[in-house]
Image (tube, rainbow, N blue to C red):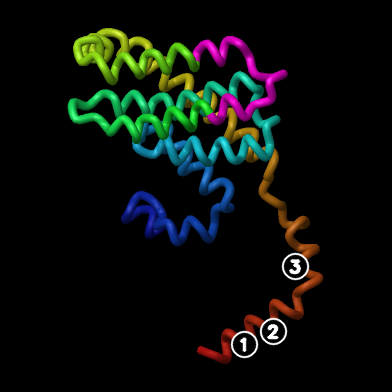
Amino acid sequence: MSRILMEHGSLPLSSLRLIVPPVQLVSAALWEMVRQGAVMYYGLLEEFIASVLDTVPELLSYTERAQLVMGLRARVVLECCRSDDFASPQAIQHHLNRINTYITNQDNETSSAEVKASMTNFLQLVHTLMVDRCQRDVFYQKVFPTVFGPKYDSALEALMRKFLFNLQKLLPVPNLEQVDFPLAQSLPLCLERVRRLHEST
């Protein structure tokens, strides 16, 4: 294995799957998406995070959940609006619907007025960007780099790091003793499968 690392600088994915637990492998991939700013995957990332948080909401506070989910999806919307031949209004509306659905599906007692106001302001901004090319040019030249630039990306990274850390705490990697007991119970079955596999080759 050290020879492969020396020649290629990293392990192939097939090897990583053998030595890295699945949750850590997925977490690393999700982390790299955010760290590298791969906005094209943020929609997929947001869907994964939202489904995990629907199941285990205590991984983040309500405000952190809203900031991470809305922040990722908002970044996608702003990238769609940025180009001259930006995505169709229907594609942008799909992303806005995801944000709105997330907010409306939250418990009214936990949802904050600040989050709802932020959503309303964002919807107004997107509407302006879609209908006023001059305002759009000014926004992307002057406002976007400061409001949605490195500080915004750092805030998303911090929230993502906390989400992944809490997820890994929730699903820890079992140690040898934890794996050994179930394996010991089914060892005869495992040995029989190995024997059959060996015979078939």
Neighbours of disc 1 within 10 Å: few (<14), some (14-19), many (20+) = few
Residue that badge 3 annotates: 183
Compared with 118, 67 (above or below) is: below
Residue that badge 2 annotates: 192
**Callout 3 amino acid:** Leu
Ranked by sequence position, the earlier of labels 1 and 3 is 3
Is 149 covered by the magenta stretch? no
Residue at 72% in and 18% down: 109
Q: Position of residue 144 (x, y in %)?
A: 31, 14
Q: Dividing the image into 4 quarters, which one contains the N terminus?
A: bottom left
Pointer 1 with pointer 2, Cβ within 8 A: yes
Neighbours of disc 2 within 10 Å: few (<14), some (14-19), many (20+) = few
Neighbours of disc 3 within 10 Å: few (<14), some (14-19), many (20+) = few
Residue at 75% in and 75% down: 187
Residue at 70% in and 77% down: 190
Q: Which residues are magenta?
A: 101-118
Q: How far apart are the alpha carbons under marks 3 and 2?
A: 13 Å
Is 107 covered by the magenta stretch? yes
- Kindly indicate the quadrant of the structure image that contains residue 139: top left
Residue that badge 1 annotates: 196
The one nearer the camera, 43 or 187, is: 43
